[in-house]
Image (tube, rainbow, N blue to C red):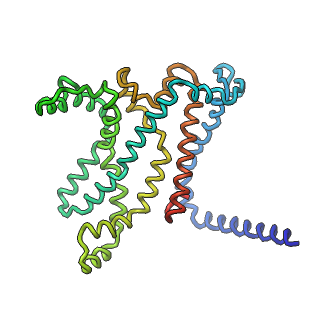
Amino acid sequence: MASKEGTINVRNTDNKKLHSFKKNLISNWQLYVFLLPAIIYFFVLHYIPMYGVQIAFKNFIANQGILGSPWVGFDHFERFFNSYYFWRLLKNTLLINLYQLVLFPLPIIFALMLNEIRNGVFKKWAQTLTYAPHFISVVVVVGMIVAFLEPSTGLINHAIVALGGEPISFMTSPDWFRHVYVWSGEWQSLGWGTIIYLAALAGVNPELHEAAKVDGATRMQRILHINIPSILPTVVILFILNIGKFMSIGFEKVLLMKNSLNSETSDIIQTFVYETGLLEGQYSFAAAIGLFDSAINIFLLVMINQIARKTSENSLW
């Protein structure tokens, strides 16, 4: 009897939720119409192609198609895990991402600094100067890096020689690859990354600062106890999103910067997928490696989101 009553209650709850959804859909249909293009985009370009993920478990033969290709199970994964280059690819990918993660606070610090500038003209000039690199093509950025760091004619090496040092071959040295890659990326994205934080800071109630001033709080104290707590939810969400793409380094820039001399530190999973999949035609093997990379991203995203939800009130879901 109790079981039947429980089932009836669950059904009633489901009916209420369905009725509430229909009511909300009818009353806000314009918003759902605006949302429809984004849903179609993700469904067509992101979800439907997931059908092809199964070739990671098959020996894909183009003339037989995905369905006609024979299943091989986890053979491609075992081949990758047992290969001599597995640990080098994993280490390089992790180290570059950890390096970038260490610099995650820089846009926050920069946004806090910009927010404290009272000279409007200088503030706009600083924002424009730091935003501009975001719109430069990756190819152009790498060309600039090569030109500035060239041993004989580069501006950086000219400065090093002028200070009494020896020219450094930055682009062919494995020891310098990660530094050049990460800091050039930070230069390009720093200003753009501050936009969201500046928007969050703009929403801070000015009365909080006025009250703090009356109580004798210094500027640094107001930053620590008003500004930072106010933007903390935004920081947490963006940190979770960054973790969600932890293993996904944009391979275009790495591909343009890498060469046979710096491959010891420039070989990463994404460039290896490109080389084995598109250049060598090992589609199933490349798909398996890409799936392994995506699985780690999903695991990290879920784990960090759970930690954020338990330790704070901010999470993606």
Residue 177 placement (x, y as % from top left)? 33, 31
Please give left or right for residue 213 compared with residue 20 in the image. left
Give the left or right position of residue 236, taking residue 83 as reference. left
What residue do we see at 35% from left, 53% from top? 105
Query: Which quadrant of the rendered structure holds the N terminus?
Result: bottom right
63 or 229, nearer to the observer:
229
Question: Within the image, what quadrant is residue 172 found in?
Answer: top left
Query: In this picture, is 192 found above or below 317?
Result: above
Nearer to us in this view, 97 or 184: 97
| Residue 188 placement (x, y as % from top left) | 31, 42
**Residue pictured at 35% horizontal, 60% vertical:** 199
The residue at the point 44 percent across, 62 percent down is: 233
Q: Is residue 281 left or right of residue 177?
A: right
Give the x, y percent position of residue 200.
37, 62
- Residue 33, compared with residue 95, is above or below; it is below
Quadrant showing the C terminus: bottom right
Q: Which residue is at a point 15% across and 30% down the rendered structure image?
A: 165
Residue farthest along the right direction in this orientation: 1
